[in-house]
Amino acid sequence: MQHGPAITFRFAGQSDANAIRTIESEAGQRFFSVDMAGIADAPPMDLELVVRKIAAREIIVAVDADADATCAGFVMFEQQPTRIYVQELDVLTAYAGQRIGAALIEQVAQHARARRLSQLILSTFREVPWNAPYYRRLGFRDIEEAELDAALIERRNAHIARGLDESKRVFMRRDLA
């Protein structure tokens, strides 16, 4: 029986910063397949931002122990008073279909539970197959417009200011037991 790579998870170190940006760029290429070239062509996060998030211990990487500790994916998040906001989740195409994204979300859920935080929250594209439909399979549910709190409305406004089409996006939450 074929087993996938030996994937382990850890907080990102400063030496992972460029790999994280490469993974983000490569994962973004998938958006060409859904006619979202603007997303696919977007430059990766600024190196300074990645370095800052690593220092804050707000990026967890999936590492392939069989491939010279190659970073296969990452999740970047922000701790808020009662929840964790998942900012970015990307996995290299070569590792797609191995449940690495789901495992990264579970790592963040464990991190949240250890801090007595009650939910994960994120914003994603409603119709892109590896966005909202994927997160629903991981236990997230859509947050209706009327349920958005001030922090989420502020985040949505920041997305609009950045040029994102919020009519195609949805906020989602997963309550943690």
Image (cartoon, rainbow, N blue to C red):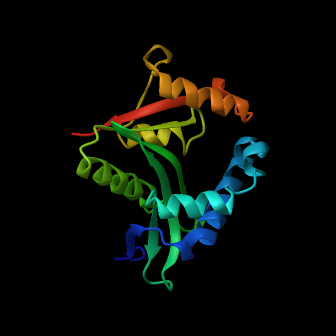
- Looking at this view, is 103 or 159 the one in front? 159
Quarter that holds the N terminus: bottom left
Q: Residue at x 26, y 48 (%)?
A: 115
Q: Position of residue 162 (x, y in %)?
A: 72, 36
Q: Residue furthest left?
A: 177
Q: Position of residue 51 (x, y in %)?
A: 58, 64
Q: Position of residue 52 (x, y in %)?
A: 56, 60
Note whether 25 is above or below 124 in the view shown. below
Do we see residue 91 in this rendering? no
Q: Residue at x 65, y 23 (%)?
A: 167
Q: Position of residue 99 (x, y in %)?
A: 41, 59
Q: Within the image, what quadrant is residue 57 found in?
A: bottom left
- Compared across the picture, whether 175 is left or right of 177 comes to right
- Compared across the picture, whether 14 is left or right of 136 comes to right
- Compared across the picture, whether 32 is left or right of 155 comes to right
Q: Residue furthest top?
A: 146
Note whether 174 is above or below 114 in the view shown. above
Q: Residue at x 74, y 49 (%)?
A: 32
Q: Residue at x 62, y 57 (%)?
A: 49
Quarter that holds the C terminus: top left
Note whether 25 is above or below 81 in the view shown. below
